Amino acid sequence: EPEVTQTPSHQVTQMGQEVILRCVPISNHLYFYWYRQILGQKVEFLVSFYNNEISEKSEIFDDQFSVERPDGSNFTLKIRSTKLEDSAMYFCASSELALGAETQYFGPGTRLLVL
Amino acid sequence: GDSVTQMEGPVTLSEEAFLTINCTYTATGYPSLFWYVQYPGEGLQLLLKATKADDKGSNKGFEATYRKETTSFHLEKGSVQVSDSAVYFCALASGGSNYKLTFGKGTLLTVNP
């Protein structure tokens, strides 16, 4: 069964460093998402992406964050200058369509720790 | 804005016990409702969903009914197994924003043999 993959599974970085989290969505999906979950808190929407541009972003997704689809398979989340509060589990998701009832398929997540 | 409130965990049950995890929501319009499950070391997987009032979603013995009058989508299973041990997330996608899911905090379920 097709699945969303994410790399790395864990990343430790120093505050102020740039990190890139990578995702490979399901191949025929057109809509891509990033979510994050700070330890003990809710899974929060960050951004959605379609047709090489951002469809929607949350208040969390400020200028420090960017997303890109650099080729036909990868979807990346970049954090330019990490802060301690960026420590979280980051989930990538994809869906075939962008409808309210459409299932989003999630990857296993990347656990980011900022020291 | 949209929000989901679900039962705080952790929940610990014995095998074959009855499970209920409560979920209520606040949303504009008529949201679609979902239950996702996360097994240890894995990503979030869709367990079941319902797209309109009175719909019942079901999968793997789990059920949830979309109750518009009580704005609820409680998850139930008649007889849990050890393999059901996981974190369960209630979520919604509202008509105002079809591109994102709003999640509850998650409920950790542990089933003991």
Image (spheres, coloured by chain):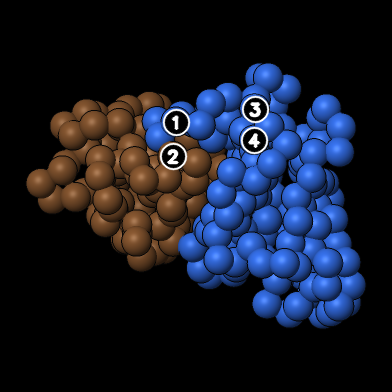
Q: Amino acid at mark 4?
A: Tyr
Q: Are marks 2 and 3 in contact (CB under 8 Å)?
A: no
Query: Which label belongs to residue A99?
Result: 1
Q: Are marks 1 and 3 on the same chain?
A: yes
Q: Nearer the viewer, residue A66 or B48?
A: A66
Residue A66 in sight here: yes
Query: Which label belongs to residue B98?
Result: 2
Picture colour for chain B: brown
- Please state which of the two labelled residues, at mark 3 or mark 4, is closer to the viewer: 4
Q: Using the image, determine if residue B58 lies above or below residue A53.
A: above
Give residue A112's position: percent from left, percent from top. Answer: 76, 64
Q: Are marks 2 and 1 on the same chain?
A: no
Q: Is disc 1 surrounded by few (<14), some (14 to 19) or many (20+) residues within 10 Å?
A: some
Q: Is disc 2 surrounded by few (<14), some (14 to 19) or many (20+) residues within 10 Å?
A: some
Query: Which label belongs to residue A50?
Result: 4
Question: Alpha-carbon distance for marks 1 and 4?
Answer: 13 Å
Q: Using the image, determine if residue A63 lies above or below residue B42.
A: below
